[in-house]
Image (tube, rainbow, N blue to C red):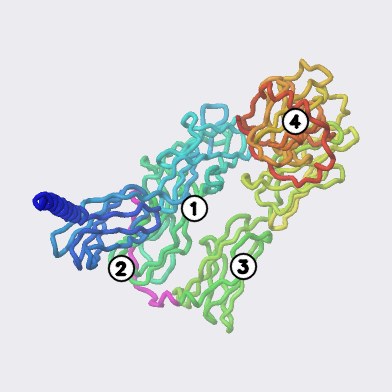
Amino acid sequence: MKTHINKWGAYLAIAILGSLVVAHLSGFASASPRITAVSAVAGYGTTLSVTGMDANQPLLYTLNNPAGQQFTFQGFTDTNGSTEYHVSESYLQTAGVYRVMAQETRGSLATKMSVFTVYPDQTSPQASQFQLSKQQVQTGAYDFALAKVRIVDAYGNPLSQHFIQIISTRPGDLIKPYVTNQYSTDDRGEVTYALTSAQAGISTYTAYDLTAQHAVGTPLSVQYGSSNILGVGGDQDAGPAYSFTFEQMPVSVQVNHPIDFTVTAYDIAQKMATSYVGTVHFAAIGDNNMYVSFPQDYTYTPSDLGKHTFPLSLQFQQEGTYQLQVQDTKKPTLVGTTTIIVKGGSTTSSSSNNMVAITAPSPGSYSANIQTISGNAPAGKDVKIYDNNEEIGTVVANLKSQFEYTTQPLADGAHEFAALSVDQKGVVLGSSDKVSITINTKPPALQSVQLVPGFSVTPGLSVQIQVMSDAHLKSLTIDMNGTQTDLMEDALQPGVYQGTFASPVQPGQYDLKFIIHDALNNQNSVVYEQKLVVTPDSAQSLKAVKDVKAAPGLFKVSLMWNDPDNSPALVHHYRIFYGTSPTALTGSADTQGNAHQWYIPNLQNGIAYYFGVVAVDASGSYGAGGTLAVATPNDPATIKGGLPAADTLIDSNAMNGETGPEVLWLIPLSIAGYQASRKLLGKAARKGSRTGRQ
C-alpha cells in the first residue's frame, strides 16, 4: 500500500514540476521584447507600448513614415521592463503604413519591427482643389475644358469614394465624367469631368462634394464662343505650371525701400501657365535671410491667369546680395529663383513702419468711386499715396501726425492703397500696410430668365422662374402686373435666383419687370425682352389627368391615374410632382412611357406627401394641372385622393431620381383610398427625401 501511494505521489510531483517548467518557459516567451502602436488619424497622436525589455533601461525609438522619413525618440523602461511613449500629431500627418521599433541604448535587447496605420482625416474644403484645364472653349468644335477636383484632408492626404457634382449656372451645358461612369474620387482623391457647351457665353461652375456636403474651392468660369470671338491662339494650349519667374523687379534696391514685383508661372515650353491656381511661399536662401520682409503666402485665382503682382511687398533691412525663392506649397519642385543686390541707404529700422498707417477706408467694397484716404504719419513729412503700385498723389502730415488725401474718380475693380513717408531727400521713413478695396458703380445686370412651364401659360397658373444675375445681391424682385415677388439665391449656384409667381387671371401679354439691388445698394430696374403670354385654358392640347390615387407603403407611395379626357394618344409620358406641402411640390419624377401607375420610393415614414400628375407630350409641353392626392408612407389608413390644387403643379427643376412602375398587387390597395381630409392641410410641411429606385 505504501509503495502504491509513493508511486502516485511521484506521478503527482512530476506533474507539478512539469507545469512549473511550462509556466517558466511561457514566462520567457511572453517576456520577448515587443512594441505595439494604436492606429491613428492624420493629425492625431498615438501611443507606443513596449514590453519585455530590461528594467530601467534607456530606449531609442525609430519611426519610419510612408514618405520614407525617419524620426527617433528617447525614453526609459520602468522596473518591469515596460514603458509607453506618446508620439505627437506633428509626426503623424501623412496617411499610410508606419513602421516602428525600439532598442536599448545600453543593453542588447531590441524589438522586432511593428507596423500601424494612419488614416486620412476628414475632408478639408480649404486644402481640396477645383481646377480647370483652360478658361476658353470653342463652340461648334470638338473642344472641351477639363474640370479636375481633388479631395484631401488638411494635410494633403487624398480621400477616395467622394461623389462630386459639377454645377453650371447655365442649364444647357454638357457635363460628363472624363472617365466613363467615374463620378467619385479615385485613390489619388481625384475625379475629372469634361465641360462643353453649344451656346456662346460665360458659364460659372461650382464643384460640390456630395459625400461631405460642401463646395470645393471657388467657382470657376469658362468662356464659350467661336474662335474669332475667343481669339484662340497664344497660350491657350499651355500645359501645367513647370516653373516660376520673378519679373518687373530691379537689379538693385536701397535698404528699407519697399519694392513691387511680379511672379509668373510658365509651363515646360515656357508658355504662361494661365490655369495655375496654386499657393506660393517666399523665402531667402542664405545667412542673410532674416533681413528680408516678404509678402504672405498667396493663392493664385483663375482671374490671375498665372501671373500676379505684389506691390510694395518686398523690403530689405541690410545691404548685400540676396537669393530669393518662390515655391509652390504643394509641389516643392515647382520653384523660381532670382538674385538682387541691396545697397546701403537709410538705416531706419523696419519698426518705423508702425509710424505710418492708413485708417480709412477699411478693406471692403464701395459704390462711391471717390475715396478719402486718411491715416497717420510722421508730422511734417511728405506722404506718398499709391494705388495698385502707382503713385497717385502726395500730401504732408499735419502737426498731429495725420494726413488725408481725396482721390480722383477711380475705375471699377480692385484697388490696393499704400502710404509711404519720405524725408526731403526721398529716403523712405516708413510704409503702411496695404489696404484693399473694390469699387463697383455699375448697376447689377440681368443676364437671363427662364420660366417653367414657359413664357406661354394659362391664367392663374403657378410659374417657376429662374434668373441669372450678379452673385450675392441684396434683393432681386419680380413685378408681375403690380404684384411683387422676391426671388432667393441658390446656395449652391451663386448668381442663380429662383421663385414662384402666379400668372395673371386675364389673358394678354405682360411685361416681366425686375428690381435689383446689389450689396452696395446699386439699383437697377429692368424690363425683360420677352413678355409673358397668358392664353385661355382651352388653348392647351392636353387636359388634366383624372382620378389620381395614392397608396402608402413602407418608405414609398404608389400612384395610379387615368388618361386625360382629350387625345390620350398625344401623351408621351407623365410627370409626377410631389412634396410635403400642397403649395410647394419640390420633387419630380418622369414615368417610362405613358404608364398609368408608378411608385415614389425613399420617402420618410409618418409624413404626409402630396402628389400631382400631369401629362407631357412629345415636345415636352405640359397638360393642365389636375387634382392632388395625398398619402403618408407606412400608414395605409391615410390613402387619399382628389384635393383640387391645379395651380400648385409646377416644375421644380429638381433632379429626377430613379422611380419605377408599381407591381399589380398594390393596385387593389390604392383603389381603397378615400378623399383627402381638409384637416391634412394643417400639417407642418417638411422637405421630402430624394427619389430613388426601390
Q: Nearer the viewer, residue 618 or 368?
A: 618
* 2 or 4: tag closer to the N-terminus: 2
Q: Which residue is mark 3?
A: 361
Q: Which residues are magenta?
A: 332-351
Question: Is residue 339 part of the magenta span, yes or no?
Answer: yes
Q: At 64% across and 63% down in the image, what residue appears? A: 408
Provide the secondary structure element on which disc 1 rests. loop
Provide the secondary structure element on which disc 3 rests. loop
**Disc 1 residue type?**
Gln
Residue 675 placed where, x, y %?
A: 83, 33
For the residues labelled 1 and 4, the Cα–Cα distance comes to 46 Å
* 3 or 4: tag closer to the N-terminus: 3
Q: Are marks 1 and 3 in contact (CB under 8 Å)?
A: no
Q: Nearer the viewer, residue 307 or 426?
A: 307
Q: Nearer the viewer, residue 130 or 250?
A: 130
Q: Are marks 2 and 1 in contact (CB under 8 Å)?
A: no
Q: Could you tell me if residue 54 is visible in this image?
A: yes
Nearest to the eye among marks 2 and 4: give it: 4
**Numbered badge on residue 126:** 1
For the residues labelled 3 and 4, the Cα–Cα distance comes to 62 Å
For the residues labelled 2 and 1, the Cα–Cα distance comes to 33 Å
